[in-house]
Amino acid sequence: MPKISVEVPEELLADLDSHVGENGKFVNRSEAIRASIRKTLDVLDEIDERHGRLEEGER
């Protein structure tokens, strides 16, 4: 799996960390970020679909 590096503002990282760990929804930051990317891409696909911008089989 490729690795990427990103800069994240402290307040966003603190919010992310509140959802990670034993009492959080994700086991680690990487899982939380991957889930967020997937969700964002799904939302963008839904928007494109509503506006007729998806080709057959793109979803």
Image (spheres, rainbow, N blue to C red):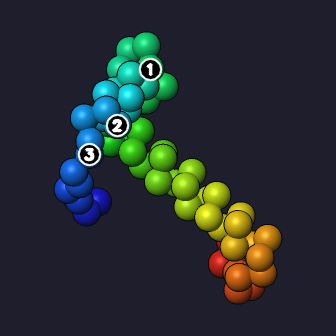
Vertical comparison of 46 with 37: above or below: below
Tell me the residue at 29%/60% (across/down): 1
CA gap, disc 3 and disc 1: 20 Å
Please, what is the three-letter code of the amino acid marked with disc 3? Val
- Asked if disc 2 and disc 3 are in contact, CB closer than 8 Å, the reply is yes
The residue to which callout 3 is attached is 8
Q: Secondary structure at mark 2?
A: helix
Label 2: few (<14), some or many (≥20) within 10 Å? few
Q: Secondary structure at mark 1?
A: loop
Q: Is residue 37 left or right of residue 55?
A: left
**Disc number at residue 12?**
2
The residue to which callout 1 is attached is 24
Quarter of the image where one finds residue 2: bottom left
Q: Position of residue 37 (x, y in %)?
A: 47, 54
Farthest residue to the bottom: give it: 55
3 vs 1, front mark: 3
CA gap, disc 1 and disc 2: 16 Å
